[in-house]
Amino acid sequence: MPWREVSVMDQRREFVMLAKQEGANRRELCRRFGISPQTGYKWIQRHDAGDTALADRSRRPHRSPERTAAATEQQIVALRDAHPAWGARKLARCLERDGQAVPAISTVHTILRRYDRVVEPAGTPGQPYTRFEKDAPNQLWQMDFKGHSALENGVSCHPLTALDDHSRFSLCLAACDNERGSTVKGHLETTFRRYGLPDAMFVDNGGPWGFTLEDPWTALTVWLLKLGVRTIHSRPYHPQSRGKNERFHRSLKAEVFAFRRYRDLPDVQRALDGWRS
């Protein structure tokens, strides 16, 4: 005959039934059931009070005097609904800038989860990558194109982005119609005049800064070398090494390109300038 499965509540009811028999040694019963005397007497008292199910009760306190005010929670949720791509850190900063009393960032995230505004990623998170950050601005810039997007006039937009590795400051955010080296050079000249020259540029292995063993130099990388700017290439198929730029592209996609289509490149550039600001 197979063993009968016994639930925790069945064991509690059995304990109470045995403990209430005449002459029962309750402390011995507690040892047999693997519980403390305090726990045993608690279940007996609950059963005597009419709780025959003996199920677990909520451990939430009756009062939470330090809980965030309902009005503040509604402000956080309303701002999140207006900007679905914003996380707890940005929401808290915007409310604080507007003079609102804001709880800790972790509390803001908890509020978003409570109101089903945050969906936890599926699966088990992987191990974090080793992070790095330069000691000062202009020591390293990360630069890349963020994939193309089709416009209503039939032209493809190729957003060009450049970030300072130390501060994550957005140095360049341009709506381009191609990914040619001459286009990148023109935007870099404008950026260099405004922010100075970096020590090095961190790029991937695609055009126009592509890197191959047969031809390690392109016209753009030679131009940068003559200016004293080194070009550093990431490992092939390892975009996480340029994580700051990739994360910037994620926000750019979610907050600029996810909700509307654009007529032409000037229309995109106006949206990029407003979002960058």
Image: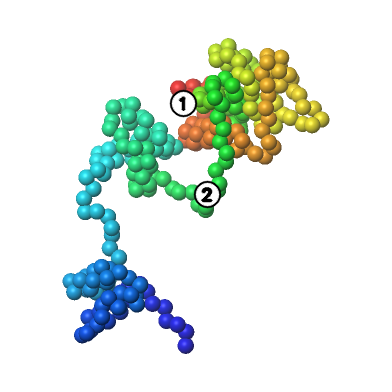
Residue, disc 1:
275
242 with respect to 15 (left or right): right
Residue for point 40% across, 33% down: 90
How many numbered marks have been drawn onto this rendered protein structure?
A: 2
28 with respect to 176 (left or right): left
Whether residue 20 is situated above or below residue 77 in the rendered picture: below
Q: Is residue 117 visible?
A: yes
The residues tagged by marks 2 and 1 sit, at their Cα atoms, a distance apart of 30 Å
Which quarter of the picture shows residue 143? top right
Whether residue 55 is situated above or below residue 101 in the rendered picture: below
Instruction: Please state which amino acid type lies under the numbered disc 2.
Output: Pro
Q: Position of residue 43 (x, y in %)?
A: 25, 71
Instruction: Please state which amino acid type lies under the numbered disc 1.
Output: Trp
Q: Residue furthest top?
A: 193
Residue 125 shows which numbered tag?
2
Q: Quadrant of the C terminus?
A: top left
Circle nearer the N terminus (2, 1): 2
